[in-house]
Image (tube, rainbow, N blue to C red):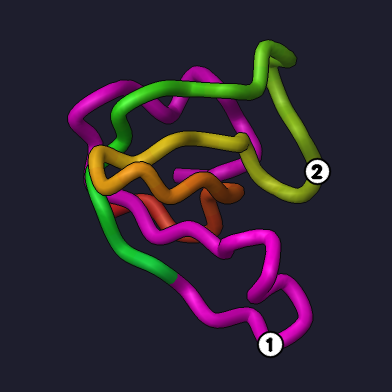
Amino acid sequence: MSGTQRANIHPGLEVKIVLKEHQRSGTLTAGIVKDLLTNSPNHPHGIKVRLESGAVGRVKVIG
């Protein structure tokens, strides 16, 4: 599944995101989706989400 499609992502899903400050290095942060922040049905850099930990970033890996 692709992290660029909003339909593939829902609260409670385990994902890996890249935080804004880690975009250059590509360091991923794992967590559970709390909120979807991107309203568009797709986004080329990944759907922006907030994890239960409070971290905000774009989804790169689902599962």
Q: Which residue is mark 1?
A: 25
Label 2, secondary structure: give it.
loop
In this orientation, which residue lies closer to the viewer: 2 or 53? Answer: 53
Instruction: Identify whether 14 is placed above or below 23.
Output: above
Is the C-beta separation of discs 1 and 2 under 8 Å? no
Question: Between tags 1 and 2, which lies in front?
Answer: 1
Q: Which mark is residue 44?
A: 2
Q: Position of residue 14 (x, y in %)?
A: 23, 47
Q: Within the magenta stretch, is there residue 27?
A: yes
The residue at 50%/35% (across/down) is 49
Q: Within the magenta stretch, is there residue 33?
A: no
Q: Position of residue 61 (x, y in %)?
A: 44, 59
The residue at 68%/87% (across/down) is 25
The residue positioned farthest toward the left in the image shown = 12
Sequence-first disc among 1 and 2: 1
Instruction: Identify whether 2 is placed above or below 6.
Output: below
Q: Quadrant of the C terminus?
A: bottom left
Q: Callout 1 environment at 10 Å: few (<14), some (14 to 19), or many (20+)?
A: few
Judged left or right of residue 43, residue 63 is left
Label 1, secondary structure: give it.
loop
